[in-house]
Image (tube, rainbow, N blue to C red):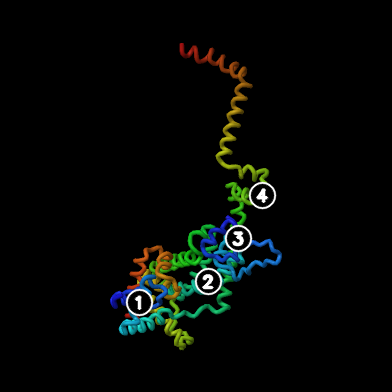
């Protein structure tokens, strides 16, 4: 390692050799062993690193506890406000009930039914009812439509 | 996803097996929650365990207040820290143990909050800006170490935002350049460049 490379690495990584790229630590140590100017540069840079790492005073125990209590109180409030809404949303998606193994019944079961399947079921039911009603009312339909055709539409066409 | 289903992921993260073991032995005693690794606590928090989350808050709040003091300023630091932990709770479902540890995620959320604050502050008319705490007036600052901290904080405050963040993560949060790059969402060589320029500028300011 050249002294220039050594200086460039200190400029980027400081003097904590553990944070240096793997391959350069041994070379840097060897250079410092052989070159007094490299050792001086390292010592001066280390003083600067100590300054950079100057610790802020931490929170006092009371302040830390007060902040933590404040955060947890807001979480409890958030949860109590959001819980009923979340439960309804999850049921509608059919997620929470199925995951937790809750029994599905009544309106809950209808809401929890997957949406595409529900649409298909309603469509099939509607079609079946339509056909059934059509077949059941066929004579009545003819009785209403035929005179209308005979007395109204055909004379109008002719 | 339950605790059991995450066992493989946690092993991948290097979480000790004693935290994962579920013994049939009646004499087996589960490790106390207080001593649990962050990842285990976060998994429990994700399942709604507020006690586990409280331990995480207590464990990390000093660091987050310190980070916010350096990046934004002392006046807003505690508010920012509170918002960071509330945001973490709100987004707890988004945390995935296999996508990096808890600490990088925490710092990413914290830095985003700090950046929001500094940008909002730039848009606040000067007469509406919060009054800055005059650290120099505090009698406790007669203490040398506090004076050094205040000098350093003043100097760091003069750095451009990204240099300030890189320097803080590297020297105060004791991250490597690669870890800082991950938290900042930047390439390693870009962060190394920020560290170099930041260190040079601080040397000028503090000399």
Kindly report the distance in space between the C-alpha atoms of the residues bearing marks 3 and 4.
18 Å
Side of B144 where A125 appears, left or right: right
For the C terminus of chain B, which image quadrant?
bottom left
Observer-nearest of B60 and B13: B13
Q: Is residue B27 left or right of residue B56?
A: right
Residue indicated by mark 1: A28
Report if the CB atoms under discs 2 and 3 are less than 8 Å apart: no
- Measured in 3D between alpha carbons, the distance from the residue under mark 4 to the one under mark 1, in whole angstroms, is 64 Å
Mark carried by residue A20? none
B45 displayed left or right of B164: right
Q: Are marks 1 and 3 in contact (CB under 8 Å)?
A: no
Q: Say whether mark 2 and mark 4 are on the same chain.
A: no
For label 2, the SS is helix
The answer, for residue B44, to whether it is visible in the render is yes
**Distance of mark 1 from mark 3, alpha carbons?**
50 Å
Q: Quadrant of the N terminus of chain B?
A: bottom right
Task: Residue at 43%, 71% (x, y): give it.
Answer: B169
Mark 3 neighbour density, 10 Å: few (under 14) some (14–19) many (20 or more): some
The image position of residue B161, as x and y in percent, is 37, 70
Labels 1, 3: front one: 1
Task: State the residue position of label 3.
Answer: B48
Between the C-alphas of marks 4 and 2, the distance is 37 Å
Dot 4: element: loop
Residue furthest to the right in view is B26
Determine whether label 4 and label 2 are within 8 Å by CB. Answer: no
Mark 2 is surrounded, within 10 Å at the Cα level, by few (under 14), some (14 to 19) or many (20 or more) other residues, namely some
A69 or B132, which lies in front?
Answer: A69
The kind of secondary structure element at disc 3 is loop
- Reading the image, the residue beneath label 4 is A102
Residue mark closest to the camera, 4 vs 1: 1
């Amino acid at each position: 390692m050249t002294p220039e490379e050594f200086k460039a690495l200190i400029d980027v990584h400081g003097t904590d050799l553990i944070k240096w790229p793997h391959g350069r630590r041994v070379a840097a140590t060897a250079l410092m062993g052989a070159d007094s100017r490299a050792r001086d540069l390292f010592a001066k840079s280390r003083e600067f690193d100590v300054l950079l790492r100057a610790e802020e005073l931490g929170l006092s125990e009371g302040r830390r506890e007060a902040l933590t209590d404040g955060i947890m109180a807001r979480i409890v409030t958030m949860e109590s406000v959001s819980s009923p809404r979340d439960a309804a949303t999850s049921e509608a998606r059919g997620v929470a009930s199925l995951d937790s193994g809750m029994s599905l019944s009544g309106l809950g079961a209808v809401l929890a039914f997957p949406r595409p399947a529900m649409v298909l079921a309603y469509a099939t039911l509607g079609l079946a009812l339509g056909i059934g009603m059509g077949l059941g009312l066929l004579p009545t339909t003819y009785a209403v439509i035929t005179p209308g055709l005979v007395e109204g539409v055909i004379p109008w066409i002719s | 996803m339950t605790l059991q289903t995450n066992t493989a992921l946690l092993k991948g993260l290097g979480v000790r097996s004693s935290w994962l073991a579920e013994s049939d032995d009646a004499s087996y005693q589960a490790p106390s929650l207080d001593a649990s690794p962050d990842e285990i606590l976060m998994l429990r928090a994700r399942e709604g365990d507020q006690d586990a989350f409280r331990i995480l808050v207590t464990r990390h709040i000093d660091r987050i207040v310190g980070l916010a003091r350096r990046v934004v300023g002392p006046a807003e630091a505690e508010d920012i820290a509170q918002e960071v932990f509330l945001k973490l709770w709100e987004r707890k479902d988004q945390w995935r143990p296999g996508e990096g540890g808890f600490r990088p995620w925490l710092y990413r959320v914290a830095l985003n909050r700090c950046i929001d604050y500094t940008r909002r502050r730039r848009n606040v008319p000067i007469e509406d800006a919060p009054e800055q705490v005059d650290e120099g007036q505090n009698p406790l600052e007669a203490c040398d170490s506090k004076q050094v901290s205040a000098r350093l904080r003043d100097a760091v405050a003069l750095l451009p935002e990204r240099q300030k963040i890189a320097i803080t993560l590297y020297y105060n949060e004791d991250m490597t350049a690669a870890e800082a790059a991950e938290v900042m969402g930047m390439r390693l060589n870009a962060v190394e460049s920020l560290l170099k320029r930041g260190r040079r500028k601080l040397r000028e300011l503090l000399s």
